[in-house]
């Protein structure tokens, strides 16, 4: 029989591979949104300085650019590829689906990014050394280039959640995938909130320079950043409302039921903190302090971006990309335009273990001796993208989900009626495989629960299959 094009599985026991990506992505989003927001704020401030003849503002701009260069660009450039490397290991087929649609879009993003990095160096080293008109032109080119990277990447990110309509499945047109229903609200939401992020770190930098700047200039800078920050928060929240209205039905179910409530609480609190801080610094710029603004900037990481990344990842379920590849890498829907067929019928017929070339020989055929081991392999391959399947802690652990179910018949009758194409919940794929494979999965789950809900995270293979190969 034909095997399907699966890849080896990256199982991260406690937190799940998705959380590894989320941590890298959170660092990246903080760095990238700071630098894109700052690129526009700084171009605006420089234009203002030129028009109103306030050359001291250039000293501030230079300091901010240095901060961007040393912090944002280093951490951003490492974590950007880091996201795609970790995502490629966690979900090669998801990334493959994206590359097959967006390879040129990605290439364009790299061009803009290279331009952006080159320009940040040029801007820093030429400020005050070339005439201001030319410098301003470069600064606005930098701003446009930075925002262009966001403009492009958001198309790929929102396609991951959903192509937004059935059109793309039959047209296969890259623009249908890119400008999906979700695209503009998503782009505008990020394009607004980034000013609150860049404004906060900008106020931290300004407060360090309070003594070096004339009072009027200092106040001007802090007020400008505060107003942009307030505007960013207000518009960002409006666009968030629009964003939610474009989400597919299943995502709304997850937003109201599955996403932990404390994520919303964290985001609400950080928005309130940011707003209060900007209002304070807008009214009394002199009260701005580094030790107030900088911790708030760091809080954005934990209370704003991390929950946001986790929510976005959760509401995408059960898919990882384009509503046709599941998190467990099974292709679950036809994409006629690309000649892609659902693998579900093939797997149901041939069996899940037999279809995956990375399942060890000794587990391909289920026998009374290897049943539990085969069940564990199925759990790791089919469920571990979203569950910690070998313990009772961490990501939606099986130890808790199946607590008390030590009898394999009980587990089997539960799963056989729950994880079916008709009854499965919107956030979880249904089980794909033969009936005996569902029985093996149930036997494994009952076994791990009766062992206290914790077993080794390795796929085990029966001894005799090694002997047989000698
Ligand atoms: C695409 C992600 C995903 C995959 C893959 C997945 N699950 Fe789930 N599962 C979830 C989510 C989300 C929940 C909701 C509960 C939560 O968040 O804690 C859940 C909940 C459950 C529950 C508790 C009942 C419920 O609906 O709340 C069980 C039992 C379960 N999963 C079993 C499995 C089994 C068995 C597999 C593999 C065949 C599997 N899951 C694969 C995402 C997934």
Image (cartoon, grey):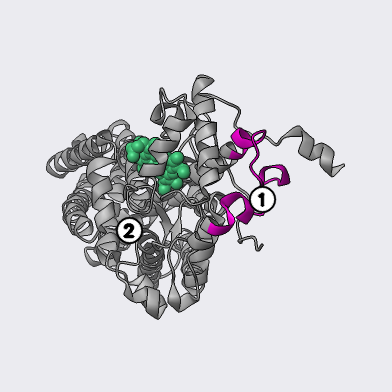
The total number of labels drawn is 2
Question: Secondary structure beneath disc 2?
Answer: helix
Give x and y (percent) for residue 174. 41, 76
Which residue does the numbered mark 2 point to in the structure image? Answer: 42
Q: How many angstroms separate mark 2 from mark 1 (CA)?
A: 52 Å
Q: Furthest residue to the right?
A: 470
Residue at 44% across, 76% down: 336
Quadrant for the C terminus in the image: top right
Asked if 67 appears above or below 239 in the picture, the reply is above
Residue 118 position within the rendered picture, expressed as x and y whole percent measured from the top left = 51, 64
Would residue 45 be seen by someone viewing this image from the given angle?
no
Residue 138 in sight here: yes
Write the residue at 28% across / 60% down: 186
Along the line of sight, the residue nearer the viewer: 335 or 210: 335
Mark before the other along the chain sequence, 2 or 1: 2
**Looking at the image, is mark 2 or mark 1 nearer the viewer?**
1
Kind of element beneath mark 1: loop
Q: Give the crowd class for mark 1: few <14, some 14-19, many >=20 residues within 10 Å.
A: some
Checking the image for residue 326, the label placed there is none
Q: Nearer the viewer, residue 276 or 289?
A: 276
Please state the quadrant of the image where ligand 1 appears.
top left
Residue picked out by circle 1: 358
Write down the quadrant of residue 1 in the picture.
bottom right
State the residue in front, 237 or 411: 411
Q: Is residue 449 magenta?
A: no
Looking at this view, name the residue that lies furthest to the left: 283
Q: Which residues are magenta?
A: 349-374
In the picture shown, does residue 324 fall above or below 56? below
């Amino acid at each position: 029989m034909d095997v399907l094009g699966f890849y080896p599985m990256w199982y991260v026991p406690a937190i799940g591979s998705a959380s590894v990506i989320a941590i890298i992505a959170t660092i990246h989003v903080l760095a990238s949104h700071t630098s894109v927001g700052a690129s526009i704020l700084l171009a605006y401030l420089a234009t203002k300085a030129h028009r109103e003849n306030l050359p001291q503002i250039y000293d501030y701009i230079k300091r901010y650019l240095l901060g961007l260069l040393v912090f944002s660009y280093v951490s951003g450039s490492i974590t950007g590829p880091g996201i795609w490397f970790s995502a490629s290991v966690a979900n090669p087929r998801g990334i493959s689906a994206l590359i097959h649609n967006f390879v040129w879009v990605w290439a364009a993003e790299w061009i803009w990014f290279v331009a952006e990095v080159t320009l940040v160096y040029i801007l820093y080293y030429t400020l005050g050394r070339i005439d201001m008109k030319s410098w301003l032109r470069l600064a606005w080119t930098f701003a446009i280039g930075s925002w262009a990277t966001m403009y492009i990447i958001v198309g790929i990110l929102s396609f991951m959640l959903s192509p937004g309509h059935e059109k793309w499945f039959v047209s296969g047109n890259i623009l249908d995938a890119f400008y999906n229903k979700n695209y503009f609200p998503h782009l505008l939401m990020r394009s607004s909130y980034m000013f609150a992020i860049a404004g906060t770190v900008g106020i931290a930098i300004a407060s360090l320079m309070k003594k070096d700047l004339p009072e009027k200039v200092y106040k001007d800078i802090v007020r400008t950043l505060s107003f942009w920050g307030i505007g960013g928060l207000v518009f960002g929240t409006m666009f968030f409302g629009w964003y939610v209205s474009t989400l597919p039905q299943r995502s709304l179910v997850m937003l109201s039921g599955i996403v932990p409530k404390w994520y919303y609480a964290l985001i609400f609190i950080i928005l309130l903190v940011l707003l209060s801080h900007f209002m304070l610094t807008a009214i009394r710029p002199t009260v701005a302090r580094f030790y107030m603004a900088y911790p708030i900037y760091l809080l954005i990481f934990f209370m704003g971006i991390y929950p946001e990344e986790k929510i976005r990842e959760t509401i995408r379920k059960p898919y990882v990309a384009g509503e046709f590849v599941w998190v467990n890498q099974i292709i679950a829907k036809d994409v006629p335009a690309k000649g892609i067929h659902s693998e579900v019928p093939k797997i149901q017929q041939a069996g899940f273990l037999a279809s995956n070339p990375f399942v060890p020989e000794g587990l391909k055929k289920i026998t009374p001796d290897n049943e539990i081991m085969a069940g564990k392999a199925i759990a790791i391959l089919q469920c571990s993208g979203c569950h910690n399947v070998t313990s009772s802690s961490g990501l939606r652990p099986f130890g808790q989900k199946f607590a008390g179910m030590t009898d394999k018949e009980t587990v089997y009758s539960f799963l056989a009626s729950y994880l079916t194409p008709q009854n499965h919940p919107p956030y979880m794929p249904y089980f794909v495989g033969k009936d005996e494979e569902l029985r093996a999965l149930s036997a494994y789950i009952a076994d791990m629960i009766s062992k206290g809900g914790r077993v080794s995270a390795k796929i085990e293979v029966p001894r005799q299959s090694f002997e047989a190969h000698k």
